[in-house]
Image (cartoon, rainbow, N blue to C red):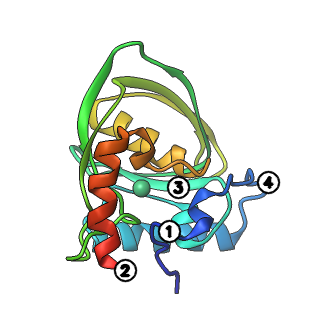
Amino acid sequence: MLQMKLCGDLILREKCAPVTEITPDVLDIMDEMVGMMRDQNGVGLAAPQVGQLKRFLVMMDPDTETVFKMINPKIITRSADVCTMEEGCLSVLGADDLPVYANVTRPQSVDVTWTDENGNQVGATMSGLPARIVQHETDHLDGILFIDYLSPVRREMVMRKVRKHK
Ligand SMILES: [Zn+2]
């Protein structure tokens, strides 16, 4: 059973290695991650959040409820247009054990490529919520958390809520 890694755990700050072979183990972990994501009403979960330093993630388009399992995802282009949306993270929890939210500005749309669970190379242009989610999740694979984008003052406000949890 996988365990959720929480903010403060240094594994969340590591850069993940590419997946070189889609083993049954990787597929099982992704299935379990989809379950964890749904259980916690999340829309995305990246491998390091469950202690795996490999480049894969799961995410859901909240509008269509389509689940994506992405292996070695890569954002190849980002729009110049940006937008601000509230973000939370299943690894950044407050005193009530629920995600702490903050506004983050990111590109409005992105082109993404990845390998799917069947080994097929796929790509998509995403905008709005899915674009937001895929950027947040691929950041995890490089040890980046959404709080890194906040101003020092905003980040301190968020971290104060998180620290109470500990
Ligand atoms: Zn996250």
The tag on residue 8 is: 1
Residue 72, position in %: x, y?
65, 46
Q: Residues within 10 Å of mark 4 (few under 14, many from 20)?
A: few
Residue 60, position in %: x, y?
34, 51
Which quadrant of the view contains residue 37? bottom left
Q: Residues within 10 Å of mark 3 (few under 14, many from 20)?
A: many
Check if mark 3's residue and mark 4's residue have beta carbons within 8 Å.
no
Label 2: element kind = loop
Residue receiving disc 4:
20
Residue 81, position in %: x, y?
34, 14
- Give the Cα distance between marks 1 and 4: 29 Å
Of residues 50 and 73, the one nearer the viewer is 50
Q: Earlier in the sequence, mark 3 or mark 4?
A: 4
Q: Earlier in the sequence, mark 1 or mark 4?
A: 1
Q: Quadrant of the C terminus?
A: bottom left
Residue 74, position in %: x, y?
60, 35
Name the residue rendered at 26%, 70% in the picture: 94
Check if mark 1's residue and mark 4's residue have beta carbons within 8 Å.
no
- Give the Cα distance between marks 3 and 1: 20 Å
Relative to 67, 51 lies left or right? right
The tag on residue 166 is: 2
- Give the Cα distance between marks 1 and 2: 10 Å
Q: Earlier in the sequence, mark 3 or mark 1?
A: 1
Check if mark 2's residue and mark 3's residue have beta carbons within 8 Å.
no
Check if mark 1's residue and mark 2's residue have beta carbons within 8 Å.
yes
- Give the Cα distance between marks 3 and 4: 15 Å
The tag on residue 57 is: 3
Of residues 78 and 26, the one nearer the viewer is 78
